[in-house]
Image: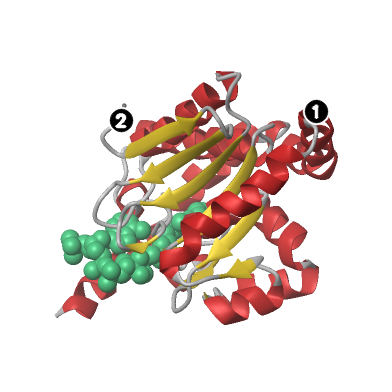
Amino acid sequence: MSSTLDFSVDEQTGIALLKMKRKPVNSLNLEFLQDIRSTIVTLEQNKKCKGLILTSDVPKIFSAGIDILEMYQPNEERLHSFWRALQDMWLQLYVTPLATIAAINGHSPAGGCLISISCDYRIMAPNYTIGLNETLLGIVAPFWFKDVMCNTVGHREAEIALALGKLYSTDEALQKGLVDEVVPSEQIMEAAQKKLLEYVKIPNMARALSKQLMRQETADKLRSKQDSDIQNFVNFCLQDKVQQSLGFYLEQLKKRKS
Ligand code: CO8
């Protein structure tokens, strides 16, 4: 078992619970992304497992998205591996034959939002924020983040959200269809279990193939461009202007505290 993830499978119901616990904010670094992906693979290989609930063990934070320190003053070789790990984790999650529910029990910006909207169904607790806020950091969400956002809220809403780096409140997210349900924090696991049982009751092959029908094209688009997407990301990150923006954003994060 990894030190940043907990998982367990209830063999009676076929439901797995996967908890992110990379303190302080479940930011996604290379190793964490690899762990998430390999855990999904392990669960897919478990014949008793039909679905998973993805949630956080860190109070008030689902995931703060990409670990900005992977992008700031990076080692170029690691930057390549990092981006491939993010692509691979996303590809695994987005089209996994397992039914997936995000129980969003805290803030979920950027990469946290991507993980949430890549699950089949999203349940969020009140008074948190979720969205693709990349432009606020002076960076741009890649095309496959954009595609998942368009698939979720439609082209026009995604266009506004991406340009403004919009972080939605839980209520706004529900209204726009970024999340599917809002329930109080203390009821979120019960609600996620209930919804997942609905999914896993559907004949497995039919459910998984219908998911594939909806999602395969989006996943294949990235698969066909993985190498160029990595190169674009690396070139973009290494620009002086981008490094300055990231440095400034990190400073602001620290200042908020004092
Ligand atoms: N990466 C690295 N460190 C982080 C991150 C992060 N994403 N988020 C927070 N931290 C650090 C903080 O700097 C702080 O560090 P320290 O204790 O050393 O000062 C520590 O984590 C705790 O953070 P906070 O004190 O801010 O905790 P709060 O509970 O007050 O707030 C939040 C939690 C709301 C999550 C807040 O930390 C926050 O808003 N974080 C930034 C989230 C963000 O903007 N993420 C975007 C990352 S970019 C991304 O995911 C997609 C990039 C796509 C690639 C684009 C191509 C170039």
Tell me which numbered mark, 2 or 1, is placed earlier along the sequence.
2
**Front residue (pair 244, 115):** 115
Q: Are marks 2 and 1 in contact (CB under 8 Å)?
A: no
Above-or-below relation of 60 to 53: below
User: Where residue 187 is drawn, which disc sits there?
Assistant: none
Q: CA distance from mark 2 to mark 1?
A: 30 Å
Q: Within 10 Å of the Cα at label 2, are there few (<14), some (14-19), or many (20+) other Cα atoms?
A: few
Residue 18, picture quadrant = top left
Residue 254 appears at what percent x and percent y?
21, 71
Q: What residue is shown at x 57% (from left), y 18% (from top)?
A: 45
**Front residue (pair 22, 101):** 101
Above-or-below relation of 88 to 22: above
Residue 209 appears at what percent x and percent y?
82, 33
The residue that mark 1 highlights is: 205
Q: How is the image coloured?
A: secondary structure
The residue that mark 2 highlights is: 2
Image quarter for ligand 1 equals bottom left
Q: Quadrant of the C terminus?
A: bottom left
Residue 92 appears at what percent x and percent y?
60, 33
**Front residue (pair 193, 87):** 193
Q: What residue is shown at x 77% (from left), y 34% (from top)?
A: 208
Q: What residue is shown at x 46% (from left), y 40% (from top)?
A: 17
Q: Within 10 Å of the Cα at label 1, are there few (<14), some (14-19), or many (20+) other Cα atoms?
A: few
Residue 194 appears at what percent x and percent y?
61, 53
Q: Quadrant of the N terminus?
A: top left
Q: Is residue 103 left or right of residue 244?
A: right
Which amino acid, mark 1?
A: Met
Q: Is residue 24 left or right of residue 206?
A: left
Q: Residue furthest left?
A: 258
Above-or-below relation of 152 to 36: below
Which amino acid, mark 2?
A: Ser
Residue 88, picture quadrant = top right
